[in-house]
Amino acid sequence: MRRNYLSNIDFSKGYIIHKKPFEEHKLLLSIFDDQHGMVKAIARRPSSKKNHCLEPFIPLALQIKTTSGLANIQRIEPISTAYIPPLQGLNLWAGLYCNELLFRLCHPQETYPKTFSQYSLTLNKLSNGEPIRKHVRLFEYVLLQELGFSLDFSCLDYPSAWFTYCQENGLIPCSATQKPRFRRQSIENLYQEQFDCLETQKLMKQIFQVSITRLLGHAAIEVTSMLT
């Protein structure tokens, strides 16, 4: 990850993660974009014709003037060629979960290019009704990697049929009676970033829960239980 120094004007592609009123005619936005990462910025309230574009999950073209404090949105437009259908039901909860992870875990003004690309892809997959858990687990995996929590797959050098994951030692061989335990194929799937298998999805969930506890303590991500 590289740190961006504030004091220039950039055009970027991004998404609104959170928004709330700010003063009489402004909004305070949390934006995740491809040039700055997570940015807190002030924007003027749009006209009624453009108000619909200032919602989560809509791809936006942004002109951001960054400063030492809150950034300023000088221009914001929806990217019509990147339009995705609105998320609904559990797909909407999955999108909100991804947004909460970005908001809580990403450091301000640090770029996360792989996570940004995976986030865009995840939203498209969710909008098309593809399997939620598969794509959420893959998003978690990419985010952890870019946060610096790369997994060590040297455990595959051992001829064990079963493995487990713990905070102290990572992925390690274990007995057939230990819980939780995962088959060797699940570890190999994870190594190859293949998340079609339900057990591989459960393994990634276990890894992410352990890792997120290290990062956030016991502060819960509210919608996690919707995606078990």
Image: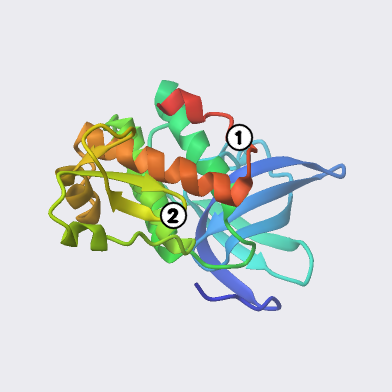
- For label 1, the residue is 220
178 relative position to 188: left or right: right
Q: Position of residue 55 (x, y in %)?
A: 58, 39
**Quick one: 17 or 139, which is closer to the camera?**
139
Give the residue pinned by disc 2. Answer: 143
Considering every residue shown, the one lying at the far top of the view is 89
Callout 2: few (<14), some (14-19), or many (20+) C-alpha neighbours within 10 Å? Answer: many
x and y percent of residue 103 in the render?
A: 60, 48
Residue 120's disc number:
none
Residue 120 shows up from this direction = no
Compared across the picture, whether 137 is left or right of 14 comes to: left
Q: CA distance from mark 2 to mark 1?
A: 17 Å
Asked whether 171 or 133 is in front, the reply is 171
Residue at x-position 50% and y-position 36%: 97
State which tag comes first along the sequence, 2 or 1.
Answer: 2
x%, y% of residue 84?
38, 39
Can residue 86 be seen here? The reply is: yes
Instruction: Decide which of 90, 128 is in the foreground and name it.
Output: 90
Instruction: State if disc 1 and disc 2 touch (CB < 8 Å).
Output: no
Measuring from the top left, give residue 132's x and y in whole percent.
Answer: 33, 32
Is 220 placed above or below 226 here? below
- Secondary structure under tag 2 reads helix
Q: Is residue 133 left or right of residue 25?
A: left
| Above or below, comparing residue 101 to residue 147 in the picture | above
Identify the amino acid type marked 2. Leu
Height in image: 34 above or below 6? above
Q: Residue at x 46, y 54 (%)?
A: 168
